Each structure stands twice: as C-alpha cells, then as structure tokens.
Image: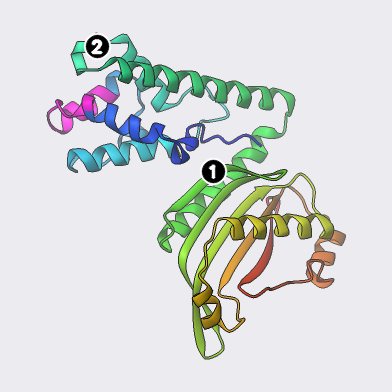
C-alpha cells in the first residue's frame, strides 16, 4: 500500500539537508513567534499543524522540528492534495526571490519538492480509485503505525525508515535500536533490535515464515557485529528481529495454525533471535 507520509523519503535523502538550509535562509530574518507563525499561515498551512511546532526554540531547533513535522505528516485520504510542505513550497515560489533572500538553488529545491510530492499524491489517488476499500484499510494501518512509532520513540528508538524495498518485499516501517537489552537467564545481553512492519494482503504459515526470514536477512545486512562480540556472546543470540506482518483479516483456521503449529520453526542462529508477529486490523 502507498505510504501516506508522502515526504518520508526525505529521511533517507540528501534533500533533508538542502531543505533545512533553504528554510534557514527564509526564517533566519523573520522576527519572533508571530513572524514564524505568520509566514506559515500566509502559505495556507492549517492551525493543527502550526500548533504542533515549538516557536519558542532557537532557529536551528525550530528548523529541525519543522522539517521533521513535514516528513511525518500524513495526507488525508479524504483530501490527498493537501500537505503543508506543498502549500509552503508553492507560496515561496510565488514570492519575489529577494523577499526571503532565496538563491536559485533554493528555488529549484522547492520546485523539485512540489514535483515529487505531486507524483506521490497521483499514485495515492490512483490506488484509492482502484480499490474502494483502500481508504478504510490504509487509515487503520496508518493509525496503528503512528501508535507504534510513538511507543518506539519513547523506548529510545530514533532510527526510522519508511517504504523500504528489500528483495521482493516492501517494508512500510523499519526501526532499529542499537543497544537493546535482552534478558537471558542471569545475564542481560545487549545487541541490535529491528522492528520491521509490512502489510500483507494474505497470510498463512508459509507466507509468515518467508516474510520473517526476509526481515531477518535485512537486519543482518544492516548490522555490523565484531568477532570479539561473537566470542563474548558464547553462541547466545544477542540481537533480535521482530517481523510484524499487518493483515486486514485473519481466518480462524489460519490463526489457530499460526498459534499452535509453530509454522516458523522459531529459529535462532549464533547471534540472532527471529520473532514473528501478526497484527490483524479487524481484531
């Protein structure tokens, strides 16, 4: 399913740095809270978004927070053409460049953002028109992932990636905690913890086994573990990969099979635990 956080790709893109630099050029000469709020209001950004910003912070903290809010904003499926970053970019492009000391590079950046955002929205609108149930299902997925992300951030996870392509699987959300503590008898092992979420249109034991293996492979690829650490672990896994499959519905027979037949052959290796999870939107 398409990601309604249409600018989440900025988390993995050099455009984040460029956007922060361009916004700094704009806001550095704007005085006070009223001035910062004013330019966003003039651009047509709604009060709900504006009220989530900390206007009392220093300029660098404010810009970092603003970019983060832009990236995390989900477009509404009822009004997919509205996004505060698109409105702000349009407003800036309509102003004389000298008004905010904008360079040619700044203008190209905001134009590029509008182009990419428009393409993302077009994909989303096409998906909505092709599937009458898409809106309801996607809203449930978004609500679930928003709650999960909030909890993970509370646990200290700051590394989030969205719409990650791995092999033939599309991960909707990938997060990582590098110093995750795992109780093991009288010892507490420390290692990496990956939390990987994907929407699967259907599920059974075989699909879940394949999906969790793909998640584990991804975690291993993105982790560097020293030989010294392997010796210390004494073949006790200290890393864990939570593979969370999100499904719309789960038939009672399949639910029973997953719960009782150990379809995943719950596996460990020298350094990893694999923990499959199924989250059903209809439960």
Compared across the picture, whether 203 is left or right of 86 comes to right
**Which of the 4 quarters of the picture holds residue 88?**
top left
- Gap between marks 1 and 2 measured at Cα: 33 Å
Residue with the mark numbered 2: 97
Q: Is residue 258 above or below residue 42?
A: below
Q: Which residue in the structure is indicated by mark 1?
A: 162
Task: Give x and y (percent) for residue 265.
Answer: 79, 71
Q: Nearer the viewer, residue 167 or 204?
A: 167
Picture residue at 81% right of the left edge, 71% below the top: 262
- The image position of residue 234, as x and y in percent, is 58, 84
- Is the residue under label 2 in contact with that under label 1 (CB below 8 Å)? no
30 and 269: which is toward the camera? 269
Between 217 and 133, the one nearer to me in the picture: 217
Q: Residue at x 21, y 28 (%)?
A: 27
| Front in this rendered view, residue 199 or 42 | 199
Residue at 52% in and 20% down = 118
Residue 70 is situated, as x and y percent measured from the top left of the image, at 39, 34
Residue 262 among those drawn in magenta: no
- The magenta-colored residue range is 25-40
Q: Residues within 10 Å of mark 1 (few under 14, many from 20)?
A: many
Residue at image position (52%, 62%) is 224
Q: Position of 279 compared to 204: left or right? A: left
- Above-or-below relation of 97 to 88: above
Tag 2 secondary structure: helix
Q: Is residue 171 above or below residue 74?
A: below
Along the polypeptide, which appears first: circle 1 or circle 2? 2
Label 1 SS = strand
Q: Position of residue 148 (x, y in %)?
A: 52, 55
The quadrant the N terminus occupies is: top right
Residue 67: name its quadrant: top left
């Amino acid at each position: 399913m398409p990601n309604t956080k249409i600018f989440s790709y900025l988390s993995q893109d050099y455009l984040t740095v460029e956007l922060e630099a361009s916004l700094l050029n704009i806001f550095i000469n704007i005085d006070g809270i009223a001035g910062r709020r004013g330019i966003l209001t003039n651009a047509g950004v709604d009060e709900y978004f504006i009220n989530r910003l900390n206007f009392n912070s220093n300029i660098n903290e404010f810009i970092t927070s603003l970019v983060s809010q832009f990236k995390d904003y989900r477009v509404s499926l009822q009004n997919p053409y509205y996004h505060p970053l698109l409105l702000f970019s349009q407003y800036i492009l309509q102003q004389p460049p000298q008004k905010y000391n904008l360079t040619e590079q700044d203008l190209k950046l905001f134009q590029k953002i509008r182009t990419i955002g428009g393409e993302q929205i077009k994909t989303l609108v096409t998906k909505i028109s092709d599937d009458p149930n898409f809106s309801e299902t996607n809203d449930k997925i978004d609500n679930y992932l928003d709650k999960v992300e909030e909890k993970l951030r509370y646990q200290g996870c700051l590394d989030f990636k969205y719409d990650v392509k791995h092999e033939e699987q599309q991960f909707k959300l990938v997060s990582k905690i590098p110093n995750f503590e795992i109780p093991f008898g009288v010892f507490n092992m420390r290692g990496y913890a990956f939390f990987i979420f994907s929407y699967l249109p259907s599920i059974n034991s075989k699909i879940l086994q394949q999906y969790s293996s793909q998640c584990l492979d991804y975690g291993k690829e993105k982790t560097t573990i020293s030989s010294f650490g392997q010796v210390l672990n004494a073949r006790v896994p200290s890393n864990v990969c939570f593979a969370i499959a999100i499904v719309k519905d789960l038939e009672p027979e399949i639910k029973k099979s997953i719960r009782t037949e150990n379809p995943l052959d719950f596996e460990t290796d020298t350094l990893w635990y694999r923990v499959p999870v199924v989250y059903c939107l209809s439960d």
